[in-house]
Amino acid sequence: MKTLFDKIWDAHVVSTVEEGPTQLYIDRMYCHEVTSPQAFDGMRKRGLKVFRPEQITCMPDHNIPTINQESPIADPISKIQVDTLTKNALDFGLTHYQMGNEKNGIIHVVGPEIGLSLPGMTLVCGDSHTSTHGALGAVAFGIGTSEVEMVLATQCVFQSRPKTMRINIHGKLNPGVTSKDLALYVIAKVTTGGATGYFVEYAGEAIEALSMEQRLTVCNLSIEMGARGGLVAPDETTIAYLKGKEFSPKGEAWDQAVAKWKALKTDEGAAFDKEVTFDAADIQPMVTYGTNPGMGMGITDSIPTLDSIDEASQISFVKSLDYMGYKPGEKLMGKAIDYVFLGSCTNGRIEDFRIFADYVKGKKKADNIVVWLVPGSWAVDKQIKAEGIDKVLIEAGFQLRQPGCSACLAMNDDKVPAGKYAVSTSNRNFEGRQGPGARTILAGPLVAAAAAVTGRITDPRV
């Protein structure tokens, strides 16, 4: 009896070093501009060609601007990063969806939406949020730059086998609660180190009821509790999502693939190294109050008091609240904010924009805040316009930006100024993550929408 993770992992083992790592075959690697330059330089120095170029896809996303993409990139560092990826992809004969290409966007959004990421695959990228692709029933994880070079050269990577963990979410999510809230709730309960060394399978009625885009959000955040990755067993939702995608199998190959995908599930009675269970009914819209994703709470709750924090964590807890300008025991409801960011590989998909637009329809953007609405890909941008979401946003006083990682991280022009508060649908709230001195409150697209029209942290259910 095997878990889903074990089945996929075992099918990709090339060799195992005794009391050491596994040589794992990789079905697909994604390369972006930040973590690949040294890997390509290493290939050149060794006189190597890419072993299987058809299994490598390159795409800039971290450094690209989200306005005026038709013009040359103004920031010199970003321009070098993006131009270097262009040269490397050309020199090594790799598929490259460069800025301006209709398939460009955030790589963790584009991969699933065009069918490059499929069930049963092993997928890697030099980016921790590669865990996103596990929502399709794949073993997907981030790797370091030296490992990127290893995959370029051999289509394999050495990895220690993770332990297995199952997180069950039973019951039904309450109205007004999104998959982002579910993920932030789990991280707050498990803690940012509670899944270290594990590969997580998400299961239970609440997970099964999620759309594919919602599952992508959940798996995206697996890394924030220390997990190596997260995955969901493929089912009819997965199959319906992938049918007709550009790179999905076609014809008889599709039928054969579907038959294999349906067998990709944890065997009855298979043992996990760790298992935890939560009740979906206990989850409400979530916000973070500190400087790591585990410092989260229900939007109507209060920040923990100092005496409720274990002694070893009290110094970092106080430091975190000092940075945020908050105090133990106080509520965040009604607190003023300065920025709202909807986007990133966590919440930059069409369903996130639908949620945001449904809430702001007939309302107006608060005058006191800046709002960045950034599609995760050009395909999402196209769908926004096809559904008339852009018109709803414009009527409410919002503007749509161009696809990219944007304000998720301070590697492009979209930086939150020092001391300012941002309600962000991205994945990390570390000090300076959105800009030096920026203060980040992680939330889902519905809480972000409520903040955008009130200028404050607001319960969207009220």
Image (spheres, helix red, strand yellow):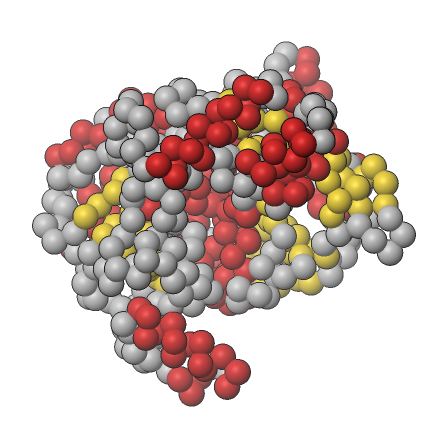
Question: Compared to 187, does 96 lie above or below?
Answer: above
Write the residue at 36% across / 49% down. Answer: 410
Q: Can you name the residue that lies furthest to the left here?
A: 367
Q: Nearer the viewer, residue 204 or 423?
A: 423
In this rendered view, identify the residue nearer to me: 208 or 304: 304
Image: 83 above or below 301: above
Q: How many marks?
A: 0
Residue at (67, 19) in percent of width and height: 255
Q: Position of residue 327 (x, y in %)?
A: 29, 78
Question: Does 420 sit left or right of 51 as displayed?
Answer: left
Q: Quadrant of residue 435?
A: bottom left
Taking the image as shown, residue 60 lies to the left or right of residue 328, namely: right
The one of 140 and 239 positioned closer to us in this rendering: 140
Comparing 349 with 64, the one in front is 64
Residue 289: x and y in percent read 35, 67
Where residue 207 sits in the image (x, y, percent)?
53, 48
Judged from this view, the residue extending furthest toward the front is 45
Q: Quadrant of residue 226?
A: bottom right
**x, y (%) of residue 270?**
77, 53
Answer with the quarter of the image where residue 335 lies: bottom left
Res. 455 in view: yes
The residue at the point 57 percent across, 33 percent down is: 30
- Extreme residue in the right direction: 18
Q: Is residue 139 visible?
A: no
Q: Is residue 456 above or below residue 379?
A: below
